[in-house]
C-alpha cells in the first residue's frame, strides 16, 4: 500500500471506475462527490462492447451483464415515414465479432454496482457532500478545497467532475460548453404502458428533422426507457409543464403515431439542455488531470459518453501505475494515448447529430437510400474502430 492518496473529484461512472482501477494497483483513493450521497439519475444507459474489457479488468463485468438487457438489434426508423433506415444487429454473431455484447442498463443499477465494488476495497474512501471548489498544486502534492471550508491533501487530483468541471476551469481556463439548441426529456414507465406496435425488446431510435426519440427496455424487460430530444429556441430557458407539452406537441405533430403516444407518457417536470465541447488538448497540468466529460464531453449520437469515461479510467490507472515513482509524468502520456480516439467520438457524434439523425427533406431521402444499400457487414465494419476497443498499456493484445 502506498502512503500517498490520489484524489478523484466526482463520484459518477468515470470517477468510480478510476477509483477501482487505481485501488487494484495499491493506491489509496479518496473520491470527492458533491451530492449528499452517492447516487445517479434514474434513467437508462447504453454500453457498447468496447466497455466490457474495461469492466472485466475492474472486476464488475459479470455483475453489470447480469443487471443488463441484451437487445438483438439497434434500429433507426424514419420518424415521418415509419420505415427502417438502418439496423445494427447485436446478436450472437455481433458478440463473436466484437468479443462482447451491446447492453442497456439502468444507470442506477450500474452506479450501485460500482459503488459497492469501491466500498469493498479498503483502499477506496468515498466522501459524500464534498463539493470541490478548486485545488492548489504545491509541487510535491496537491491540496483540494471544498465549499464547506475543508482542505484535503493528496499526491495528485483527477477531475472526473463532468461537463462543467471546476478542475477543468483551473487547468484549461474558463469556457462554456457548446449548446446544440436541443433539449431532452427522459422518462421510465412500466413496460405495459409502451405502445404495442413497436419493437419492445430492441434499442430503437426514431429520427426526424430537428427531433428524435430513443427507447429500450430495462430491468429484464419490466420497464421502458424513453428519451425525447428536439431542437427549440427555448433550450436555455426554464418553462413549466404546459409550455413543455405544447412545444412537444408542435414538434412531433407529423411524427409517427407511436412517437406521439410516447410523448404523452413523458414526465415534463424537468428537461436537459444538450451541449458538448470541441476536442481540445491540455488535459493536465502538474499534478492535476482531467478525464471523461471533463476532458472530452460528447453528444449522445454514438452512445459513448460513459464508454469513453470507462476506457479513460482503466488506461489512466495503467499509466499511473507504470509511472508509479512520477505520477505527474503519467498525465501527458494519458492524453497522448486518448486524444485521437476521444476526439473522433466527439467529431463523429457531431456529424451524425446534424447530418444523420436530424436531417429532413431530400437529404433524409438520400440518407435512407444510402443506408438501404448497406449490408449488415458494412454496418459492422463502420463500427470496428469503436467497438473493437482501446489498447490498455501493459495489457496483452485484445485484453
Image (spheres, helix red, strand yellow):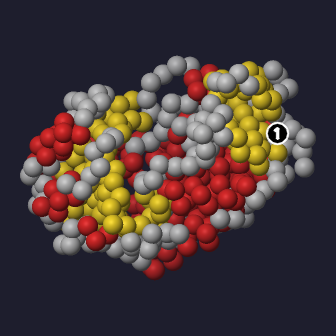
Residue 124 visible (yes or no): yes
Q: Residue at x 71, y 22 (%)?
A: 149
SS at circle 1 = strand
In the picture, measured across the screen, residue 128 lies left or right of residue 199, that is right
Q: Position of residue 123 (x, y in %)?
A: 81, 50
Q: Position of residue 63 (x, y in %)?
A: 61, 69
- 364 vs 29, left or right, is left
User: Measuring 65% from the left and 54% from the top, which residue is drawn there?
Assistant: 115
Q: Residue at x 40, y 43 (%)?
A: 299
Front residue (pair 113, 397): 113
Residue 44: % across, % down: 43, 57
Establish if 388 lies above or below 6: below
What is the quadrant of the C terminus in the image?
bottom right
How many numbered dots are placed on residues in this image?
1
Left or right, 392 with reference to 108? right
Residue at the spot of label 1: 5
Residue 251 visible, this angle: no
Residue 389 in which image quadrant: bottom right
Q: Nearer the viewer, residue 171 or 7?
A: 7
Residue 70 drawn at (x, y percent): 45, 73
Q: Residue furthest bottom?
A: 92
Could you tell me which residue is drawn at 67 percent across and 59 percent down? 116
Corner quadrant of residue 368? bottom left
Foreground residue among 237 and 135? 237
Amino acid at each position: 500500500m502506498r502512503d500517498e492518496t490520489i484524489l478523484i473529484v466526482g463520484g459518477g461512472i468515470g470517477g468510480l471506475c478510476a477509483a477501482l482501477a487505481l485501488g487494484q494497483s495499491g493506491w489509496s483513493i479518496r473520491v470527492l462527490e458533491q451530492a449528499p450521497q452517492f447516487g445517479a439519475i434514474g434513467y437508462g444507459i447504453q454500453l457498447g462492447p468496447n466497455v466490457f474489457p474495461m469492466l472485466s479488468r475492474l472486476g464488475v463485468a459479470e455483475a453489470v451483464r447480469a443487471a443488463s438487457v441484451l437487445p438483438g438489434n439497434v434500429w433507426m426508423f424514419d420518424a415521418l415515414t415509419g420505415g427502417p433506415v438502418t439496423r445494427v444487429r447485436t446478436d450472437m454473431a455481433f458478440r463473436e465479432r466484437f468479443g462482447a455484447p451491446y447492453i442497456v442498463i439502468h444507470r442506477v443499477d450500474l452506479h450501485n454496482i460500482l459503488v459497492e465494488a469501491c466500498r469493498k476495497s479498503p483502499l477506496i474512501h468515498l466522501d459524500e457532500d464534498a463539493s470541490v471548489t478548486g485545488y492548489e498544486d504545491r509541487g510535491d502534492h496537491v491540496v483540494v478545497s471544498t465549499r464547506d471550508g475543508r482542505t484535503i491533501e493528496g499526491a495528485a487530483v483527477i477531475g472526473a467532475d463532468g461537463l462543467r468541471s471546476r478542475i477543468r476551469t483551473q487547468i484549461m481556463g474558463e469556457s462554456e460548453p457548446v449548446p446544440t439548441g436541443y433539449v431532452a426529456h427522459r422518462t421510465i414507465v412500466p413496460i405495459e404502458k409502451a405502445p404495442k406496435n413497436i419493437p419492445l425488446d430492441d434499442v430503437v431510435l426514431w429520427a426526424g428533422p430537428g427531433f428524435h426519440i430513443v427507447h429500450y427496455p430495462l430491468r429484464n424487460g419490466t420497464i421502458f426507457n424513453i428519451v425525447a430530444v428536439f431542437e427549440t429556441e427555448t433550450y436555455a430557458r426554464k418553462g413549466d409543464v404546459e409550455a413543455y407539452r405544447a412545444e412537444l406537441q408542435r414538434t412531433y405533430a407529423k411524427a409517427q403515431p407511436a412517437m406521439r403516444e410516447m410523448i404523452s407518457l413523458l414526465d415534463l417536470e424537468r428537461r436537459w439542455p444538450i451541449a458538448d465541447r470541441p476536442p481540445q488538448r491540455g488535459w493536465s497540468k502538474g499534478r492535476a488531470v482531467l478525464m471523461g466529460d471533463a476532458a472530452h464531453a460528447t453528444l449522445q449520437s454514438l452512445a459513448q459518453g460513459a464508454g469513453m469515461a470507462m476506457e479513460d479510467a482503466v488506461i489512466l490507472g495503467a499509466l499511473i501505475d507504470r509511472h508509479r515513482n512520477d505520477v505527474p509524468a503519467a498525465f501527458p502520456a494519458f492524453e497522448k494515448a486518448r486524444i485521437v480516439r476521444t476526439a473522433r467520438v466527439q467529431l463523429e457524434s457531431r456529424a451524425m447529430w446534424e447530418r444523420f439523425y436530424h436531417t429532413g427533406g431530400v437529404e433524409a431521402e438520400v440518407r435512407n437510400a444510402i443506408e438501404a444499400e448497406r449490408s449488415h457487414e458494412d454496418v459492422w465494419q463502420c463500427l470496428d474502430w469503436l467497438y473493437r476497443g482501446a489498447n490498455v498499456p501493459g495489457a496483452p493484445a485484445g485484453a
